């Protein structure tokens, strides 16, 4: 038997350990991310036993970030980006300034050089793409106003980090510290101008050429009728544009992938492209968290517990308070401000890249880097818990949503107002029966309230308090129209626990999903392909047979 290559060993070890510890975390009701991070610690060099290749793990994690940002770009348009620029640009700039200042203040208190405090604070100021987007996707917030602001904020931070990574070597010499050569002010200004020029050129190329070429290419490949070739084309465009952006224009992989997705989003096939890349996105996102866990040295918690705590407070409290205040100053609702604040209360991949560069330039000590990594791990572990608290607060205090619907009787509860949900809603409305819709997307909720034809509850229907608002005890039926089988299963299970005799209808995409939902308590599961086959058969059967003639 051949020895496993480092690549195969890292992928297999990472995924197997992530599954084991993720399942344990889920079993004891912790976020599964905690399990993935523990898997990384187990596979890392600071614990005995199996040690994965850290370099390969990091590259696999980079692939995950690229695919994730590509997926976000698919659902994002330039119009969405420009719509939030008035809050995302100044908001991100001020929030990053506050966090950097707090980091420098901590460095000053510890007697660190100014440059070290600056790099440390800057690394604390930028949020993790993967953590933020996973939290938004789980709550289906990416297409909401809150989600658009968060993504716009993230893009501004990404651009700022691109500039910082290019300028840091020059800054090391300019400050007279570290290992960089001392440049003049003119050289520094020239470096800034060239970097900004490359970013502007990349954006121009994508808007002028990419906006036309990418949808055309996708349409051409779709015309071949090969699903395999279509899937390959989507991945080739995502990874190719990201790689080209980094090597030709010196922008980040993440930014390149985001614009590739945004240009592909102009195609009518964007939804299919998103579905084709989803399994790979999920798998590599898991490896991202494993790679972070591998960097963690548990000894730093013993050696510098108070410094780790101070860094965590800057990330979780300092950044959040700054973001909350900024969003509220722009007149946005408290719910939006809390969502943005919670989203940014963590740090991740760019912080590690910046810290590594700082150490190589002599601007950041290894001790400061270890403190930064420990604080990042803690913030990523705490962030899902903050979102749980936010969900509970929104469910309890959201002034836009009625607190309860005790007077409704004989109503149908519809969970999900997406492509299928809208069609179900239209059919229900035609009957004149009362309808109550549970939805998380703010735009969909706004549309329903403007119509005034249904009661609406904002929130995740899998949560018992949200279902309680729907007054299932007096409901005629529950229709679960969300596409994700796991989310649908949680809703079915929660509803069945509240009322044993409630008729529950759910949708499924496979026979496995049918069995899964039926086992959790669904009264009837509609299997898309089965219904399609039945309709085609009925249409054929009802047509009179053509008779041959001479």
Image: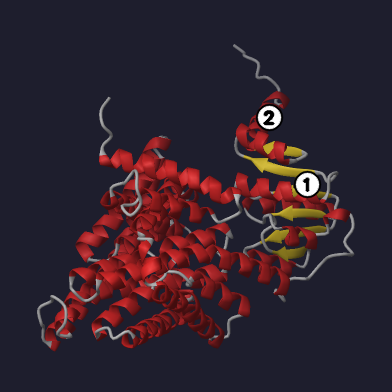
> Would residue 475 appear left or right of 393 to someone viewing this image?
right
Looking at marks 1 and 2 on the same chain, the residue that comes earlier in the sequence is marked by 1
In this view, the residue in front, 283 or 160, is 283
Relative to 287, does residue 4 appear above or below in the rendering?
A: above
| Residue found 83% across the figure and 59% down from its top | 471
Q: Which residue is mark 1?
A: 496
Instruction: Please state the horizontal and vertical placement of residue 176, each as a whole percent of the image.
Output: 14, 85
Residue under numbered circle 2: 534
Judged from the image, the secondary structure of the residue bearing numbered disc 2 is helix
The reply to whether residue 483 is visible in this rendering is no
Identify the image's colour scheme: rainbow, by chain, secondary structure or one colour.
secondary structure
Residue 329 position (above or below residue 506): below
Quadrant location of the N terminus? Answer: top left
Q: Is residue 89 above or below residue 478?
A: below
Query: Residue 502, percent across and down?
Result: 83, 46
Q: Residue at 62% x, 80% y: name it.
A: 333
Count the marks. Answer: 2
Marks 1 and 2, Cα distance to the nearest angstrom? 29 Å
Image: 407 above or below 539: below
Based on the displayed image, in which of its 4 quarters is residue 101 positioned? bottom left
């Amino acid at each position: 038997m051949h020895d496993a290559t480092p690549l195969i060993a890292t992928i297999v070890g990472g995924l197997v350990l992530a599954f084991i510890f993720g399942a344990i975390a889920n079993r004891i009701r912790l976020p599964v991310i905690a399990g993935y991070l523990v898997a990384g610690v187990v596979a890392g060099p600071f614990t005995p036993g199996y040690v994965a290749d850290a370099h390969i793990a990091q590259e696999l994690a980079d692939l995950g970030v690229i695919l994730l940002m590509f997926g976000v770009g698919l659902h994002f348009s330039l119009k969405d980006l420009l719509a939030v620029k008035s809050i995302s640009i100044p908001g991100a700039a001020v929030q990053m300034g506050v966090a950097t200042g707090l980091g420098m203040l901590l460095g000053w208190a510890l007697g660190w050089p100014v440059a070290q405090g600056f790099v440390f604070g800057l690394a604390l100021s930028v949020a993790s793409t993967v953590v933020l987007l996973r939290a938004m996707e789980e709550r289906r917030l990416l297409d909401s106003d809150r989600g658009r602001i968060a993504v716009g904020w993230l893009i501004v931070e990404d651009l700022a980090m691109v500039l910082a990574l290019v300028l840091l070597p020059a800054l090391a010499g300019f400050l007279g510290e570290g290992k960089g050569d001392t440049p003049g002010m003119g050289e520094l200004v020239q470096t800034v101008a060239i970097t900004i020029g490359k970013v502007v050129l990349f954006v121009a190329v994508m808007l002028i050429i990419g906006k036309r070429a990418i949808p055309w290419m996708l349409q051409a490949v779709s015309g071949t009728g090969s699903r395999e070739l279509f899937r390959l084309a989507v991945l080739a465009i995502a990874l190719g544009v990201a790689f080209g952006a980094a090597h030709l224009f010196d922008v980040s992989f993440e930014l390149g992938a985001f614009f590739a997705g945004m240009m592909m989003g102009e195609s009518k096939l964007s939804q299919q492209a998103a579905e084709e890349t989803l399994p790979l996105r999920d798998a590599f996102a898991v490896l991202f968290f494993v790679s972070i866990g591998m960097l963690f040295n548990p000894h730093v918690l013993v050696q510098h517990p108070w410094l780790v705590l101070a860094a965590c407070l800057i990330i979780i409290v300092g950044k959040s308070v700054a973001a909350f205040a900024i969003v509220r100053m722009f007149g946005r609702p408290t719910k939006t401000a809390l969502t943005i604040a919670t989203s940014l209360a963590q740090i991740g991949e760019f912080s590690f890249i910046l810290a590594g560069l700082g150490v190589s330039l002599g601007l950041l000590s290894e001790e400061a880097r270890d403190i930064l990594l420990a604080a990042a791990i803690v913030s990523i572990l705490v962030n899902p818990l903050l979102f749980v608290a936010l969900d509970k607060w929104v469910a309890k205090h959201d002034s836009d949503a009625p607190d309860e619907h005790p007077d409704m009787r004989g109503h149908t509860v519809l969970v999900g107002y997406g492509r299928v949900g809208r069609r179900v809603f239209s059919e229900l409305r035609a009957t004149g029966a009362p309808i109550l819709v549970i939805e998380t997307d703010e735009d969909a909720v706004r549309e329903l309230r403007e119509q005034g034809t249904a009661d609406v509850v904002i929130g995740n229907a899998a949560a018992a308090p949200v279902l309680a608002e729907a007054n299932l005890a007096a409901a005629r039926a529950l229709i679960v129209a969300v596409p994700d089988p796991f989310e649908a299963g949680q809703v079915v299970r929660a509803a069945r626990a509240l009322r044993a005799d409630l008729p529950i209808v759910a949708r499924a995409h496979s026979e496995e999903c049918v069995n899964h939902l039926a086992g959790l308590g669904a009264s009837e599961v509609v299997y898309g392909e089965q219904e399609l086959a039945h309709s085609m058969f009925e249409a054929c059967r009802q047509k009179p047979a053509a008779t041959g003639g001479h």
